[in-house]
Amino acid sequence: MKYVGITILTAAICFGARASEPKHINKDCWKNAVSQLDLNGCAGSETETTDAELNRVYKAIKDRNKKDAIFLKSLKKSQLAWIKYRDAQVEMKFPPYGSSTDTSYYYGSMQPMCEATYETQLTRERISVLKEWLVRHGDDGCSGSQP
């Protein structure tokens, strides 16, 4: 039990407070985790949930702007560039040292949790940026306007 407390404390230090965590995240998963494998699973599940939210927001923007082909082309270009950015950021934070692409041997058993949590953080930031297009698109002179 002492190991679990240390692991959770280390995770909290590694990732900071989770105050901005969406309500749909399963907090019980984190509370009930008893091993690093469990914590890795919670982080992976959180990443999947956040990615699903990103896809929902992206689709809502597409639906709202379905008649604006130029905007949709730009949105897709932006999203594809962001995915490359996200992947590069994760790789920069956890470089694939050694001859293997599996970085867990270098970073230890916390690596999957750390990587998933960082990816989730980046995805939440992207969701925040994209949500602006659901509430403000075209509302000021600098955000672009719909034809």
Image: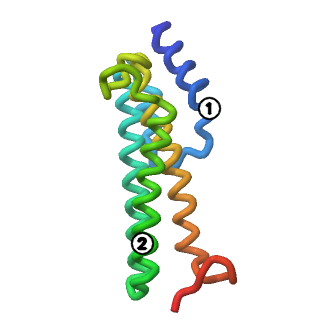
147 over 83 or under it: above or below: below
On the question of residue 61 being in view, the answer is: yes
- Residue shown at the point (47%, 50%) measured from the top left: 85
**Could you say which is closer to the camera, residue 11 or residue 108?**
108
Quarter holding the N terminus is top left
Which of the two labelled residues, at mark 2 and mark 1, occupies the earlier sequence position?
1
On the question of residue 23 being in view, the answer is: no
**Could you say which is closer to the camera, residue 66 or residue 40?**
66
Q: Are marks 2 and 1 in contact (CB under 8 Å)?
A: no
Of all residues, the one furthest to the front in this rendering is 99
Query: Residue 16: x percent and y percent?
Result: 62, 32
Q: Where is residue 101, by image quadrant?
A: top left
Mark 2 is surrounded, within 10 Å at the Cα level, by few (under 14), some (14 to 19) or many (20 or more) other residues, namely: some
Q: Where is residue 58, by image quadrant?
A: bottom left
- Residue shown at the point (34%, 22%) measured from the top left: 37
| Distance (Cα) linking label 2 and label 1 | 31 Å
Residue beneath disc 1: 16
Q: Amino acid at mark 1?
A: Gly
Q: How many marks?
A: 2
Mark 1 is surrounded, within 10 Å at the Cα level, by few (under 14), some (14 to 19) or many (20 or more) other residues, namely: few
Left/right placement of residue 48 relative to residue 89 reads left
**Could you say which is closer to the camera, residue 12 or residue 88?**
88
Query: Residue 140: x percent and y percent?
Result: 68, 81
Residue beneath disc 2: 60
Q: Amino acid at mark 2?
A: Ala
Mark 1: secondary structure: loop
- Residue shown at the point (62%, 41%) measured from the top left: 19
Left/right placement of residue 3 relative to residue 98 reads right
